Amino acid sequence: MVLLHGLGCSARTWRHLVHELDDELDCVALDLPGHGEESGSDALTVAQMVETVLEQVAELLRVRRPRAWVLAGHSMGGKVATLVAAAAEAGRPGLTPPAALVLVASSPLGVEPMEESKRAQMIGWRADGELSEQDAAEFVDANTADALPADDRAEAVADVRRVSRTAWLAWLERGSLEDWSGTGPVRTSTLVVAGGADGDLGADAQRRLVLPAVAATEVVEVPGAAHLGMLEQPAALAELVRDHLHWTLPPPDLPPGLAALLASDRVSARTRRVLLRRLAPPRPHEQVLSDAQRATLVAVVARVLPQRATDVDLADRIEADLAAGVGDGWRFADLPDDVAAWRAGLDTLAGRPGGFAELDDDAQDAVLADVVAGQVGSANAGHLSTEQMTLWFEDVRAAVVRTWVSHPAAMARIGYDGFANGGDGARKQGYLRVGAGEREPWQTLPLEVLA
Amino acid sequence: MRLDEMRTHATSEVVDAVVIGTGAGGAPILARLAAAGLSVVALEAGSNSEPGDHTADELEAADIYWMDDRLSAGEMPEVFGSNNSGRGVGGAMLHWGAFCPRPDARDLALRSTTGAGVDWPLAHAELVPYLAEVERFLSVSGPATYPWDDTRSYALPPVARNAPAQAMARGCEAVGLTATDAPVGLVTRDVHQEHWGLRQACVNCGSCHQGCRNGSKASMDATYLPLAVAWGAEIRPDSMVTGMERDEHGRITAVVYRRDGVEHRQRCRAVFLCGGGVETPRLLLNLGLANSSGQVGRNYMAHVATQVWGRFEDEMRMNRGYPSSLITEDLLRPDGADFAGGYLVQSLGVQPVTLATSLARGGELWGDRLVDLLEDYTHLAGIGINGECLPHESNRLVLTDEVDAHGLRRARVDFGRGDNEDAIDAHAEATMREVWEAAGARDVFTIPRSAHTLGTCRMGPDADSAVVDADCRAFDVDNLWICDSSVFPSSLAANPALTIMALALRTADRFLAGTPRP
């Protein structure tokens, strides 16, 4: 989990939350340019901060090879985080998109709502260069519901004073005013958190300005917190994060070795985008099959391609393709259009004496062998004849293998790394060794263990 | 490819020629006519792209395949889609396999030498200079000496032998067959292609069929089309031809096409129809054009393309490297054969979705047997043929009552094998099994398959039996020329692309020479 703090904060602002989540997540809180240990940095515009974070995340992924990563952003860091997620989704080399995005009292992608008098006051604090301890303390106190414990408050005040003057002004005079709402919405599943006692960036602003830009349907309010929820209510915030990740972290069928290869510059942005999209469950689609037909399909798919080390939801993907009208450029002249053929084929199987889904594996195999041999069919309306069933079952086999083999988890399983045969550089990598029994060092698929 | 600075023509301008399709037939014609100073416009149904736009992902690469539904029937229904015709500036050559054998002289005279099939109405010797010209222009790579033709030489060294090629070399040697590095339409050294730029040496990525990403492969968008544009040709992508207007003498006066949902008509003096073995006859049948012979759509041929597969002890990782880097022509006329014609054999590296689909369809595999093979992907390798297919009465393309988005009726193709194809298939399977077992393959199995779409607008000696004459000019329509795989009178054992390109140059030359109709 990579964490990006807000204006006037630093990596250590997250430390209580990190402590809460440490057992489950490898947390890396970054100092944004101009803040914390990076106060000397001059990469202070929004675009520069995003670029800086993208490079740092790519390096982290390269070195630590997590099976998935999560991005969190607070306030100013929330705007940066959202843009980083968008860049990762767009196929940025070296990155996979985050599995989830956590936004705490986030600044919106558009212009941040802030009263001009408040903006003027905060700019005024740095008119003479240094920020006084008194002004810094006023800033911290104004952002908390109740006074922080003394140690936390002292550290928070010190962090505000550590921010370089240029960074402080860059955000107030430019970054917070830049309208990036044309980017997005991001598809990464997002947890949007608001402090119950926050002001300009409270729940209402989150609903109006942040939700439209992310993949979330609601804003979760944390009682007893204003703008610095990670310091004010770290346990409650950790619980929300845990709960969100429970539902959104990918199933462990993207092993670290595959994630790193997908992220590498051996893969083109287009190919990476395609494979990442394919890793996600199919988009919500029209239900073209009845519940009974779906049950038969699930049973047929399991017999056509008994998965051993992967768990790809083949039946759902096939139905999604049918609903979307994804064809393969031809069809048997003796079959009706795809959706009608699949409905009729499944109904024919289910309608035979003894049904299909109810049978045990061996009996199902025997029925399918009979289909191939032209011995299963029906003259009933809405059913397929024996000849049609043989043809339809050929289509079924092709759809099932195509759906499985094209899934990155299956590629990892069978040891196929051809998707990584060239990135977007002026020279494509290709393969240096093509002979039998030869492998290049980067060729680590198939992976021994698929979690 | 770059189209931003090309010369453009008004649709009201009467251009010298409209070329329909930008693949192996259309692209060389376009270049030849433009270089001769003619005003030419190419209409391409697909979109324009740069090599770097392609993706190695087999499903995503569907954007360079012709994916409009076709209906398949017969004893051995054709698998279209990713097989055969393509879409995009460059046509099917965007995803061609780049396998570049020349047609054998005996194959053009099949009837006179075997009594089966038909002869080509032109001599092999007439094609040879054109074949050589195409090879030179595309910088075809190949062996220093070609065992079956000592007059031939290739400009660039052969591609690297990948694992299946190594196995085939081993197996062929063991059973006494001569095999060598295949002639391949890609560059094995960096080559500057005039009017296009640097074609980088092949990096063995193995994704030829998904579109070459560094210009190594001789796709038309990296070779003939930039040449054509440099000479003033215009290419209009995303332009689907739906009609032709004719005058009272039957000559075509304009080509009607749809682009971005708007109908246009380009006035012209001549038309070159180069849409491939399916789309060309489909358009003619839809328009009721050039079919007084009744031969449009008939004589549909698809090469016997049987594959033999096996598992090897070594890791093969056959997706690496140029897929078909070894060839033998020893079986073009095997001793004691009980069939007309013959076949070429090539080594096979196949990407996983293509392989899995073949196993599931032609191989009739499913369940544990299928999963066993797929999970052994890195140890599999194949060997396959391209063999003669005779024309048969029952193999033909007709129109259905279903229409596509443009209102054109969809094609239905009936295909099945006759005795000659069965005999070639049996001979080839036995030969390949022997080679593969000698190479060390275990668990050897066969997948029946066919490839290419040929013959549906046959070239021939007279208007009763053929659609076009030996110059590829339509008998029925004075200013219509057809040049693609549809004009092949016989299938030839060689993969068709090189022959189509050579024929295209010849067609353009005959047109330019104004040769009177015989």
Image (cartoon, rainbow, N blue to C red):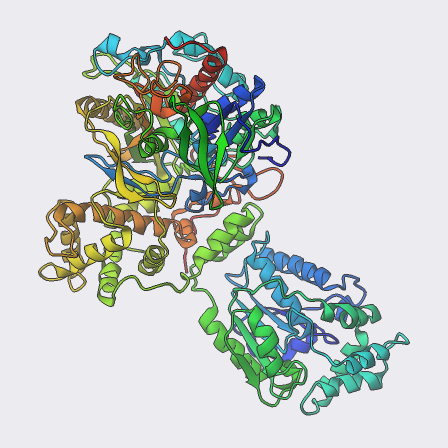
Residue B142, position as x, y percentages in the image: 48, 19
Q: Nearer the viewer, residue A62 or A142?
A: A142
Left/right placement of residue B464 relative to residue A412 reads left
Q: Nearer the viewer, residue B98 or B269?
A: B269
Specify the farthest residue to the bottom. Answer: A146
- Quadrant hosting residue A279: bottom left
- Quadrant hosting residue B515: top left
Residue positioned 37% across, 16% down in the render: B103
Residue B40, position as x, y percentages in the image: 53, 25
Left/right placement of residue B412 relative to residue A198 reads left
- Quadrant hosting residue A162: bottom right
Image quarter where the N terminus of chain A lies is: bottom right
Residue positioned 43% across, 11% down in the render: B128
Image quarter where the C terminus of chain A lies is: bottom left
Q: Is residue B90 visible?
A: yes
Specify the farthest residue to the right. Answer: A128
Residue B314, position as x, y percentages in the image: 38, 36
Residue positioned 18% across, 16% down in the render: B338
